[in-house]
Image (tube, rainbow, N blue to C red):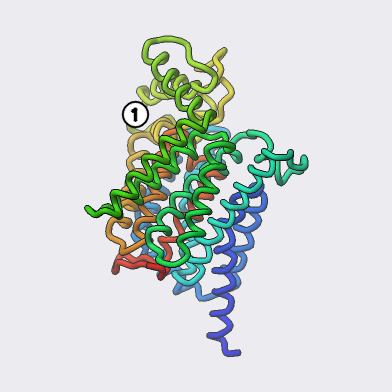
């Protein structure tokens, strides 16, 4: 085997590991983290780092991501540092993992990774069905399916929502295998709305499907049929998914009570956090209070309230503004708007995937610490790498080759 063939084999090994990561998102976080480390080692051993650096440097997101790093360095140099400064600083750099992922370039691994996301969603849906019929064994690998156990349970719901929406895109784009895609889409959606206790994942499903529908909007009878089918599905979900309907109505009542100065429920505690965080922002809107300072200041300001022990305000827009100011949140928005711009310019299904994942990410940032929590952030970096690997500032591309 020649040296070039050896490098190519090592590169494909790294791509293969990356293609498996979407499947791991439906398992305990340690499995995903192990996969990321394994991928990083494979990249290191693969060599060819000069070409890898060129891929990263030529990517349209390279300079926006570098801009966020520069802002964080500036903030760290001139503002007071919290005792958790370095931990918080590293959380802000989650997009560096995205650059690592896209360094392997485009290839067949992207289609495989997308299929692994669908397989993982099918696996998660199956566990929900099994547990509904008969309790799953009390093993750690099933804990987030048995109980609503915090952020990992939320992430599973998010991934079901995004996977379902992307499967809807595949259903429209692909001429073959439509019947199994329809079955899997319905299979995932039922599990999401009936058993996955997360409003965020449910809303993401509708948002991603909406982006896909608008992207393919044409004035034809087929578009009309799809629109009617989506409307009927939404009505059916609202009528049959009692848990989803109650959570959405609860959100509405909390918003109404909060706006009128009333008492919100325990699920509406986010509104309380938003109000106090906005007070923090008003004190130093341009530069913020410093990286990692929200967690130090908030318990004092929220003493005696339900949200006193929260780690974040469950809103990245507010958290970024509170800690690194309007300058920081503007840099974050530059990254996200660049993703939308890339998606609009890309050909075919990959462009739709970029738009859909970005819209889900931007919504997630409004109701969760979607990037500051590495559990969520890493998952979305993996998803974004699928359609965005191989994209360059010098050309528009459709990298998965399935359009």
The residue positioned 29% from the left and 52% from the top of the image is 223
Q: Which residue lies furthest to the left in this view?
A: 219
Q: List x then y, in percent, for residue 387.
A: 42, 61
Residue 325 position, x and y percent, is: 37, 34
Q: Which of 8 and 47 is in front in this view?
A: 8
Question: How many marks are shown on the rendered structure?
Answer: 1
Answer with left or right where residue 246 lies relative to residue 326.
right
Taking 238 as reference, is 271 above or below it?
above
Task: Name the image quarter holding residue 363.
Answer: top left
The residue under label 1 is 285
Name the secondary structure under disc 1. Answer: loop
Name the residue nearer the viewer: 197 or 268: 197
Work out whether residue 341 can be spotted.
no
Tell me what residue is drawn at x 60 percent, y 39 percent.
Answer: 153
| Residue 271, position as x, y percentages in the image | 44, 22
- Location of the C terminus by quadrant is bottom left
């Amino acid at each position: 085997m020649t040296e070039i063939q050896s490098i190519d084999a090592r590169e494909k090994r790294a791509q293969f590991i990356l293609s498996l990561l979407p499947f791991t998102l439906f398992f305990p976080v340690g499995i995903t983290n192990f996969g990321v480390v394994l991928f990083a080692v494979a990249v290191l051993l693969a060599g060819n780092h000069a070409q890898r650096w060129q891929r990263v440097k030529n990517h349209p997101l390279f300079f926006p991501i570098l801009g966020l790093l520069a802002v964080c360095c500036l903030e760290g140099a001139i503002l007071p540092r919290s005792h958790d400064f370095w931990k918080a600083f590293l959380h802000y750099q989650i997009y560096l993992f995205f650059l690592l992922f896209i360094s392997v370039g485009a290839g067949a691994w992207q289609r495989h990774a997308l299929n692994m996301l669908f397989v993982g969603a099918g696996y998660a849906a199956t566990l929900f069905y099994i547990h509904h019929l008969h309790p799953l064994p009390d093993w750690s690998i099933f804990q987030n399916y048995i109980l609503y156990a915090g952020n990992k349970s939320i992430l599973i719901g998010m991934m079901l929502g995004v996977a379902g929406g992307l499967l809807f895109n595949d259903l429209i784009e692909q001429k073959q295998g439509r019947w199994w895609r329809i079955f899997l889409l319905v299979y995932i959606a039922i599990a999401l709305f009936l058993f996955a206790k997360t409003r965020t994942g449910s809303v993401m499903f509708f948002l991603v499907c909406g982006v896909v529908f608008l992207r393919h909007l044409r004035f034809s009878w087929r578009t009309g049929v799809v629109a009617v089918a989506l409307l009927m599905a939404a009505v059916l979900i609202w009528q049959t998914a009692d848990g989803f309907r109650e959570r959405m109505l609860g959100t509405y009542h909390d918003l109404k009570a909060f706006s009128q100065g009333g008492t919100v429920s325990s699920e509406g505690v986010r509104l309380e956090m938003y109000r106090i965080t906005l007070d923090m922002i008003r004190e130093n809107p341009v530069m913020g209070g410093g990286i990692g300072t929200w967690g130090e200041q908030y318990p004092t300001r929220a003493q005696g309230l339900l949200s006193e022990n929260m780690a974040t305000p469950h809103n990245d827009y507010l958290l970024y503004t509170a800690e690194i100011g309007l300058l920081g949140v503007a840099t974050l928005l530059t990254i996200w708007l660049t993703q939308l711009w890339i998606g609009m310019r890309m050909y075919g299904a990959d462009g739709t995937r970029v738009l859909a994942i970005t819209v889900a990410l931007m919504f997630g940032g409004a109701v969760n610490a979607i990037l500051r929590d590495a559990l969520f952030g890493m998952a979305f970096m993996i998803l974004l790498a699928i359609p965005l690997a191989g994209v360059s500032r010098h050309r528009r591309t459709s990298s998965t080759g399935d359009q």
